[in-house]
Image (cartoon, rainbow, N blue to C red):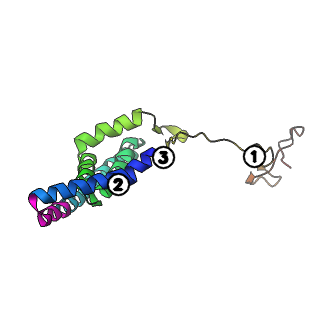
């Protein structure tokens, strides 16, 4: 909760104080021009970096690998875009750090190694997940067990049956 306070209250206050201080030193219109210029330049860099990350992700997918690094970098680029469009020098600085490839890539690797984001590749169990700090708890009801299976009827056609429970005493392979 305190973290959200810092983000939504303290950061804008610091940004306003910094903007006031800069405008006192170099003038209000020059400060406004700098804020607009950083946003425009940042969006142009964001487009190039985003396209580069997307092409790297596509190459990894084509080679059969999970593009976990590129996914994390894409999330960082999205955050960088939001920070660059927010008026202020502090948020622009953080946004430009996320835009800079030599700084972003090691930061993305560090985020992946920390265990906050987990990527698993290879085979049918490949996936990508985000760990939020809470664990999934299965409901306590026994009702609602669903068993999926295939069976052949007497005509020899294959069917997929969903939601039927098999009778363990029936050894013929038929389902009820």
Residue found at the far left of this picture: 26
Instruction: Give the numbered dot on residue 20.
Output: none
Q: Nearer the viewer, mark 1 or mark 2?
A: 2
Which stretch did the figure color magenta? 26-36
| Of the pair 90 and 97, the residue shown nearer to us | 90
Q: Is residue 32 magenta?
A: yes
Q: Of label 3 and label 2, which has the lower sequence position? A: 3
Q: Is residue 175 magenta?
A: no
Question: Which residue matches tag 1?
Answer: 147
For the residues marked 1 and 3, what is the alpha-carbon distance in whole angstroms?
A: 42 Å
Q: Nearer the viewer, mark 1 or mark 3?
A: 3
| Of the pair 8 and 122, the residue shown nearer to us | 8
Residue under the point 17% across and 64% down: 32
Q: Is residue 65 left or right of residue 80?
A: right
Q: Of label 1 and label 2, which has the lower sequence position? A: 2
For the residues marked 1 and 2, what is the alpha-carbon distance in whole angstroms?
A: 40 Å
Q: Is residue 115 left or right of residue 18?
A: right
Task: Name the spot of residue 162 as percent of width and height, x first.
Answer: 74, 52
Question: Which residue matches tag 3?
Answer: 1
Tell whether label 2 touches label 1 (CB within 8 Å). no
Task: Name the spot of residue 78 as percent of width and height, x first.
Answer: 35, 54
Question: Which residue matches tag 2?
Answer: 78
Task: Name the spot of residue 36 as percent of width and height, x first.
Answer: 19, 64
Residue found at the far top of this picture: 113
Residue under the point 35% across and 52% down: 79
């Amino acid at each position: 909760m305190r973290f959200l306070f810092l983000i939504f209250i303290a950061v804008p206050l610091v940004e306003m104080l910094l903007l006031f201080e800069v405008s006192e030193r170099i003038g209000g219109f020059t400060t406004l021009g700098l804020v607009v210029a950083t946003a425009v330049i940042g969006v142009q860099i964001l487009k190039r970096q985003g396209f580069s990350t997307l092409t790297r992700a596509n190459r990894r997918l084509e080679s059969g690998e999970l593009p976990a690094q590129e996914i994390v970098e894409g999330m960082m680029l999205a955050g960088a875009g939001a920070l660059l469009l927010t008026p202020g020098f502090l948020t622009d600085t953080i946004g430009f750090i996320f835009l800079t490839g030599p700084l972003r890539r090691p930061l993305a690797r560090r985020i992946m190694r920390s265990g906050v984001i987990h990527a698993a590749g290879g085979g049918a169990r490949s996936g990508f997940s985000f760990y939020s700090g809470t664990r999934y708890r299965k409901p306590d009801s026994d009702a609602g067990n669903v068993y999926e299976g295939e069976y052949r009827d007497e005509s020899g056609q294959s069917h997929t049956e969903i939601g039927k429970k098999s009778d363990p005493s029936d050894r013929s392979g038929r389902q009820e």
